[in-house]
Image: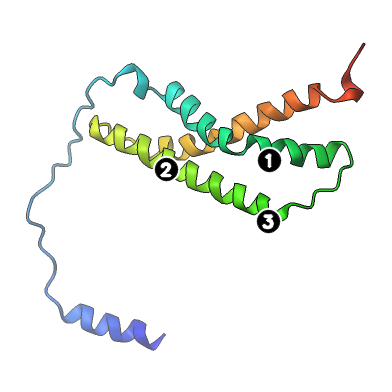
């Protein structure tokens, strides 16, 4: 807490910053985007790549929940979780880079949706897995 007051004391003694350029308050028009930079495509591709990195481990977790198996590979689960986080971050940065290179500056919610669309694939995979259980077969 004393460092806050010390920093405020020295901060108020400094000259205010002057920016080298002036920015306009009128937003630029966003040019037409290619078909692969649309929201449905980026959510589809941005979700399936991280899901592909972890779906095998997801099978074992679902088997332990629904088939009363004992899950004991928690170290490997942590490794797969770290791989999932890194893959989501890389895909999000990549698609944000593509979007900003195409002069589309509305990147905030798309960056959240790109990594978050992995959850849609996990949700759909839970339905696929549940359909494959022996208790649900009608034959």
Position of the C terminus by quadrant: top right
Among all residues in the image, which is located at the extreme top? Answer: 139
Residue at 17% x, 41% y is 25
Q: Crowdedness of circle 3 by 10 Å Cα count: few (<14), some, many (20+)? A: few
- Using the image as rendered, state which of residue 133 and residue 11 is in the foreground: 133
Q: Where does the image place residue 64, in percent across and percent down from the top left?
A: 82, 42
Q: Which residue is mark 1?
A: 57
Q: Give the foreground label among 2 and 1.
A: 1
Question: Depth check: 104 or 42 in front?
Answer: 42
Q: Is residue 105 something one can see in this rendering?
A: no
- 81 lies above or below 127: below
Q: Are marks 3 and 2 in contact (CB under 8 Å)?
A: no
Q: Could you tell me residue 43's position as x and y percent?
A: 47, 28
Tag 1's secondary structure?
Answer: helix
Res 56 quadrant in image: top right
Q: Residues within 10 Å of mark 1 (few under 14, many from 20)?
A: some
SS for dot 3: helix
Mark 2 burial class by Cα count in 10 Å: few <14, some 14-19, many 20+: some
Q: Which residue is mark 2?
A: 90
Q: In this rendering, does residue 120 appear at all?
A: yes
Q: Which mark is residue 75?
A: 3
Give the left or right position of residue 94, taking residue 137 as reference.
left
Instruction: Tell me what residue is drawn at x 54 percent, y 33 percent.
Output: 117
Q: Which quarter shows the N terminus?
A: bottom left
């Amino acid at each position: 807490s004393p460092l806050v007051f010390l920093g405020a004391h020295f901060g108020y003694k400094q000259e205010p910053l002057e920016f080298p350029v002036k920015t306009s308050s009128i937003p630029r028009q966003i040019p037409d985007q290619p078909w692969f930079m649309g929201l449905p495509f980026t959510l589809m591709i941005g979700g399936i790549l991280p899901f592909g990195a972890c779906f095998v481990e997801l099978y074992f977790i679902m088997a332990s929940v629904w088939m009363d198996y004992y899950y004991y590979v928690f170290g490997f689960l942590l490794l797969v979780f770290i791989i999932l986080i890194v893959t989501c971050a890389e895909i999000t940065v990549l698609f944000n880079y593509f979007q900003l290179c195409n002069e589309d500056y509305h990147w905030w919610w798309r960056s959240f949706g790109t990594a978050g669309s992995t959850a849609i694939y996990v949700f759909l995979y839970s339905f696929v897995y549940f359909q494959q259980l022996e208790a649900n077969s009608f034959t």
